[in-house]
Image (cartoon, rainbow, N blue to C red):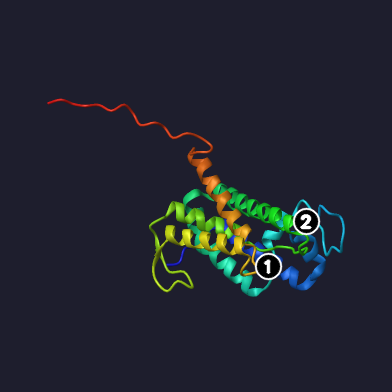
């Protein structure tokens, strides 16, 4: 059974599609300004674009092609609507943008370090960081929900799916394999999603669990 498309999820889907259409019509005029470029601390060498403060937000609504857009929007619908139904519109909106911006800040740190180390000046774009945050949130709220997700050819628990995707993102990011994918943005989305949920629950590192009450013994 497919989840209904709730208001905030629908608005995010529409916004991403509209921005992608603008990319197609306006080309580099919009792409170079609103994707996320690394920060150039060296100040030397050719630069294709520069970092601006709005880019950790705006780059999350831009995509590299129809396939990139389709799979991100499919995941946004699948995991976003159940979270919105559980949390409500305000909390879901907060969670989405915390994951989105947090993911892009993590990617910004990595890409800026690569540029400072003599690597290429490569921009990043896409909603994948926020989507990985939604996946993490879904796995935490519905850990035993069984689902089938491509390319895994069998039912799998949501919690297990989160662990697999997180481990793969970490492996690919550290080893540098599967180039052209912002793996550290994926990890950043998961990290900030986990922190946000822990904050709401009053769990460490934001609070302490309540100690169990005193034990009582009844002697018969």
The image shows residue 171, relative to residue 208, as above or below, that is below
The residue identified by callout 2 is 116
The one nearer the camera, 47 or 197, is 47
Residue at numbered disc 1: 63
Rendered image: mark on residue 48? none
Q: Earlier in the sequence, mark 1 or mark 2?
A: 1
Percent of width and height locating residue 179 = 65, 69
Q: Residue at x 39, y 31 (%)?
A: 211
Give the residue drawn at x 38%, y 57%.
144
As drawn, is 217 to the left or to the right of 36? left
**What is the secondary structure assignment of the residue under circle 2?**
helix
- The single residue placed furthest to the left in the displayed view is 220
Q: Position of residue 79 (x, y in %)?
A: 50, 60
The quadrant in which residue 40 appears is bottom right
The answer to whether residue 93 shows anywhere in this view is yes
Percent x, y of residue 106: 66, 53
Query: For the residues carrying marks 1 and 2, which lies nearer the camera in this image?
Result: 2
Is 137 placed left or right of 46 in the picture? left
Q: Residues within 10 Å of mark 1 (few under 14, many from 20)?
A: many
Measured Cα–Cα span from mark 1 to mark 2: 25 Å
Q: Quadrant of residue 64?
A: bottom right
Seen at 50% across and 38% down, the residue is 204
Q: Is residue 37 visible?
A: no
Q: Is residue 96 left or right of residue 110?
A: left
| Mark 2, other Cα within 10 Å: few <14 / some 14–19 / many ≥20 | some
Indicate the quadrant containing the C terminus: top left, top right, bottom left or bottom right. Answer: top left
Instruction: Give the secondary structure at mark 1.
Output: loop
6 to 207, vertically: above or below: below
> Can you give x and y, in whole percent of width and height, for residue 163 in the image?
47, 58
Quadrant in which residue 182 is drawn: bottom right
């Amino acid at each position: 059974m497919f989840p209904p498309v709730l208001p905030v999820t629908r608005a995010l889907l529409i916004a991403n599609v509209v921005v992608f259409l603008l990319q197609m019509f306006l080309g580099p005029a919009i792409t170079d300004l609103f994707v996320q470029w690394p920060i150039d601390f060296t100040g030397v060498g050719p630069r294709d674009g520069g970092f601006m403060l709005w880019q950790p937000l705006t780059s999350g609504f831009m995509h590299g092609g129809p396939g990139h857009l389709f799979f991100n929007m499919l995941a946004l619908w699948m995991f976003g609507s159940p979270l919105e139904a559980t949390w409500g519109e305000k909390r879901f909106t907060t969670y989405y943008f915390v994951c989105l911006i947090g993911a892009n800040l993590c990617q910004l740190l990595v890409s800026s370090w690569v540029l400072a180390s003599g690597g290429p000046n490569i921009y990043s774009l896409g909603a994948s960081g926020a989507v990985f945050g939604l996946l993490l949130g879904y796995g935490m709220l519905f850990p035993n929900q069984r689902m089938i997700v491509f390319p895994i050819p069998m039912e799998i628990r949501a919690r297990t799916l989160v662990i697999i995707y997180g481990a793969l993102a970490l492996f690919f990011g550290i080893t540098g394999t599967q180039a052209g994918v912002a793996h550290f943005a994926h990890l950043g989305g998961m990290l900030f999603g986990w922190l946000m949920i822990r904050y709401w629950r009053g769990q460490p590192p934001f609070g302490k669990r309540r100690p169990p009450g005193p034990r009582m013994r009844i002697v018969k």
